[in-house]
Amino acid sequence: MIVDVHTHLSEPEHYAGEFKVGMTAAWPQTGFTGGTPVVHREAMSSVDKMVVLAFDAPTSGFVVPNEYVAEYVRTDPDRLIGFASVDPNRPDAIERLREAANDLGLRGLKLGPIYQHVDPCSAEMNRLLHEAVALEMPVMIHQGTTFVRDAPLRYARPWLLDEVATQHPRLRMCIAHLGHPWCEETMAVIRKHPGLFADVSALHTRPMQLYMALRSAIEYGVADKLLFGTDYPFASVEATIKALYEASEMADRVGLPPVPRDVVESIIHSPSLELLGLE
């Protein structure tokens, strides 16, 4: 089974301001229609199940409503798993998360501290994560850099999640994009905490960084905590799988420390749903 734990759904009107400008510069080939339901369904035809993420970051100009994702998930509930998104700064953040879980049937929570301008260790974040744990909702968190100018990097470092995980020992959380470029921090954090994982999404364009991250995971003994994800529409399933195998082949070809092929295959076929409590 292949489970893509990181896919986006969106319409052109969901992008605005700094996010739209930054995405146009960083990912000109993606455009603003790659994540629409029709295109998403076709692009995901080769995976068995996938997580579809809402996004609530009005400060940065990217808002994909929970209702929009829930409507799409209802078209194929056997394959699609919807994650809500709630800006922790909203006064009604707890109520929004409860509504997403109880009324919309969304099963996880997507957060992006640098996009939402919130410290991962803040009281606002703490309250929302406490509710996510109570609702048994795993969290996908963007803890790493971005192309958006108005996104404070002081909130982006993966090591900040050490304090978060310590405060919430029952929390299940996946760090998106291996926390790049601070991938070694990610490995150190997910090694410490049983409920923390990381996905390999959106690193297909950075082959050396991907190789170094995979080697770091092997050396830290956490390769089994890496989950398959693409960050579609920024990367396809095929491009992500190709990049993983090429990292292994590159090591063999030039005599670098190996990334064994069976490690790559274990990531592609990771039991992500079990690890995140979504089975």
Image (spheres, rainbow, N blue to C red):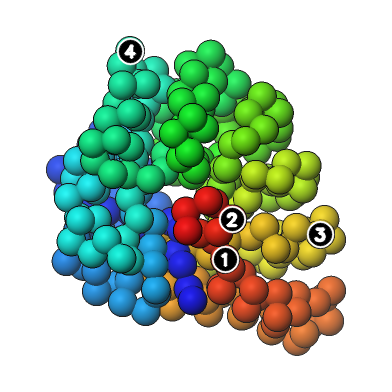
Q: Secondary structure at mark 3?
A: loop
Q: Residue at x 63, y 50 (%)?
A: 197
Marks 2 and 1, how far apart at CA: 6 Å
Mark 4–mark 2 CB contact (< 8 Å):
no
Please tell me which of labels 2 and 3 falls first in the chain. Answer: 3
Q: Residue at x 30, y 72 (%)?
A: 43
Q: Nearer the viewer, residue 184 or 103?
A: 103
In the image, what residue type sits under mark 2?
Leu
Mark 2–mark 1 CB contact (< 8 Å):
yes
Marks 1 and 3, how far apart at CA: 17 Å
Please tell me which of labels 4 and 3 falls first in the chain. Answer: 4
Q: Secondary structure at mark 1?
A: loop
Q: Quadrant of residue 166?
A: top right
Q: Which residue is mark 1?
A: 271
Residue 114, image x, y percentages? 48, 31
Q: Residues within 10 Å of mark 2 (few under 14, many from 20)?
A: some
Marks 4 and 3, how far apart at CA: 41 Å
Q: Which residue is mark 3?
A: 221
Front tag of 4 and 1: 1
Marks 4 and 1, how far apart at CA: 36 Å
Q: Nearer the viewer, residue 95 or 153?
A: 95
Q: Residues within 10 Å of mark 1 (few under 14, many from 20)?
A: some
Q: Which residue is mark 4?
A: 91
